[in-house]
């Protein structure tokens, strides 16, 4: 078995695929055919099914199902991170995760913008952009920084 050539053996969605050459008499190329299988689906056979279950039953069950990554990361193939779900349940779970991640990202961006806006030590106004300089206490908005800099000489380092 080998990983598919290309970008480090990964498909466009970040899912690793493994390739094997199988003998299939009906195949036009000397009876050999490349067969690809997703790595996480192979692992799910071992991680998500009881070992006493007949392999035919496992393969029949997984054939019509999706293998879900609980963390949402397509290459996080730890056994506890994989779950076999029917397609409808997987789609709704995945969409709910995406909405939750989008809400988290929006909340973090909002929190960062609140932290980024600070109060000017010169005029007390809230400002997104503050300037600091040697010789002046605290951060100033651009208008106060310009005003405070008037009359001071600026040295340019060599």
Image (cartoon, rainbow, N blue to C red):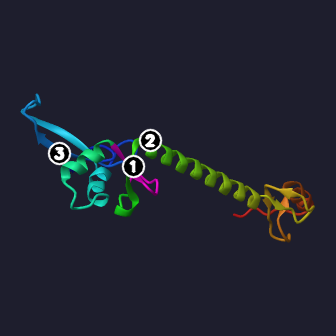
Q: Residue at x 80, y 70 (%)?
A: 134
Task: Residue lying at the far top in this picture: please name it.
Answer: 28
Q: Is residue 62 left or right of residue 128?
A: left
**Disc ID at residue 88:** 2
Q: Residue at x 49, y 48 (%)?
A: 93
Residue 108 drawn in magenta: no
Residue 49, by quadrant, is bottom left
Instruction: Estimate how packed mark 2 is, as few (under 14), some (14 to 19) or many (20 or more) residues with alpha carbons within 10 Å.
Output: few
Above or below 99: residue 77: below
Give the Cα distance between marks 3 and 2.
Answer: 30 Å
- Identify the element where label 2 is drawn: helix
**Disc ID at residue 20:** 3
Residue 71 drawn in magenta: yes
Magenta stretch in the rendered image: 65-75
Q: Is residue 126 visible?
A: yes
Q: Front-most of 24 and 127?
A: 24
Percent of width and height locating residue 32: 10, 37
Q: Residue at x 28, y 56 (%)?
A: 43
Above or below 110: residue 34: above
Q: Front-most of 134 and 62?
A: 62
- Residue at image mark 1: 85
Instruction: Estimate how packed mark 1 is, as few (under 14), some (14 to 19) or many (20 or more) residues with alpha carbons within 10 Å.
Output: some
Percent of width and height locating residue 39: 29, 51
Q: Residue at x 26, y 61 (%)?
A: 50
Percent of width and height locating residue 96: 54, 48
Q: Front-most of 64 and 114?
A: 64
């Amino acid at each position: 078995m080998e990983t598919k050539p290309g970008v480090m053996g990964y498909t466009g969605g970040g899912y690793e695929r493994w390739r094997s050459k199988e003998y299939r008499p009906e195949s036009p190329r000397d009876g050999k055919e490349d067969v690809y299988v997703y790595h996480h689906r192979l692992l799910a056979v071992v991680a998500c099914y009881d070992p006493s279950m007949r392999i035919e039953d496992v393969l029949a069950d997984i054939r019509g199902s999706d293998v879900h990554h609980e963390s949402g990361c397509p290459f996080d193939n730890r056994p506890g991170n994989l779950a076999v779900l029917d397609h409808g349940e997987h789609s709704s779970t995945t969409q709910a995760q995406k909405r939750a991640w989008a809400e988290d990202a929006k909340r973090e961006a909002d929190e960062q913008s609140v932290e980024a806006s600070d109060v000017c030590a010169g005029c007390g106004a809230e400002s997104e952009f503050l300037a600091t300089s040697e010789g002046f206490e605290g951060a100033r908005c651009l208008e106060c920084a310009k005003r405070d800099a008037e009359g001071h000489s600026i040295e340019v380092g060599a």
